[in-house]
Image: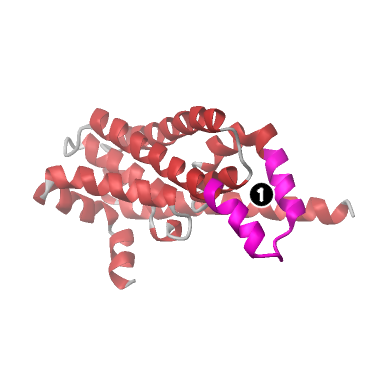
Amino acid sequence: MGELADFFFHIDASLREATLAYPVATYGLLFAVIYTETAFFPLAPFFPGDGLLFAVGVLCAGALLNPFAICILLSVAATLGAWTGYRLGKGLGPVLFERFRWLNKRNYLRAHAFYRKYGATALITSRFLPIVKALVPFIAGVSRMEPDRFAKYNVLSAIIWVVSLVTLGYFLGNVPFIRDHTSWLVIGLAAVFVGGLLVTVVVKLVRSSTLR
């Protein structure tokens, strides 16, 4: 855990050293990180995907990584990761409800109805929320969201997520303050996304309690 925390708090320096020492392998490492974070939600808290993409954009601005190759590669990783989560949810969903009787069948039906109506919006917005980005595809699979519909918005959301954050890091990467404080900006970016998620949850809880 100590090494992981050190990597997170010095993500810019860690990536820079890895890129300089192993330029080709770094592309594979980034692919593996983005894929894993989006595919397996129990592991998602240990992978700073949003901040990582921003830091990668900063490295692209410094000509250490190719921005076009990175955007294509990591969009594919994010797409495959979410598809893996979807397939896991689709395969495990019936087993979970059959084996664990305490799971509320009504919630399953609600999830199914939700993804039929709001699945596209959920897939796109969840990309920018830590942990949730990996949980949503799994739930979409559990709720049996149509594969073709999921695939279409999965690709779209992956491209939007990767390109927007890499581009943000790329254009801000040459600003001296941002270049010298990338790690703290990455932490701040994660805090903003997590804070937004918490505020949304609290507002919904308050609204639901007042309606009772």
Question: Residue at (56%, 44%) from the top-left corner?
Answer: 141
Residue 159 visible (yes or no): yes
For the C terminus, give its image quadrant: bottom right
Residue 126, percent from left and from top = 54, 42
Helix or strand or loop: what does disc 1 sit on? Answer: helix
Whether 102 is among the magenta residues is yes
- Residue 112 horizontal side relative to residue 25, left or right: right
Question: Residue at (74%, 58%) from the top-left corner?
Answer: 104
Residue 43, percent from left and from top = 42, 59
Q: Is residue 67 above or below residue 87?
A: above
Residue 197, percent from left and from top = 59, 51
Whether 197 is among the magenta residues is no
Residue extent of the magenta highlight: 90-114
Residue indicated by mark 1: 200
- Residue 23 horizontal side relative to residue 176, left or right: left
Within 10 Å of disc 1 (Cα), the crowding (few <14, some 14-19, many 20+) is few
Residue 185 visible (yes or no): no
Question: Residue at (43%, 45%) from the top-left corner?
Answer: 84
Residue 29, percent from left and from top = 24, 49
Camera-nearest residue between 85 and 156: 85
User: In this view, which residue lies farthest toward the bottom?
Assistant: 2
For the N terminus, give its image quadrant: bottom left
Is the magenta region chiefly helix, strand or loop? helix
What amino acid is labelled 1 in the image?
Thr
Question: Residue at (66%, 49%) from the top-left corner?
Answer: 200
User: In this view, which residue lies farthest toward the left?
Assistant: 21
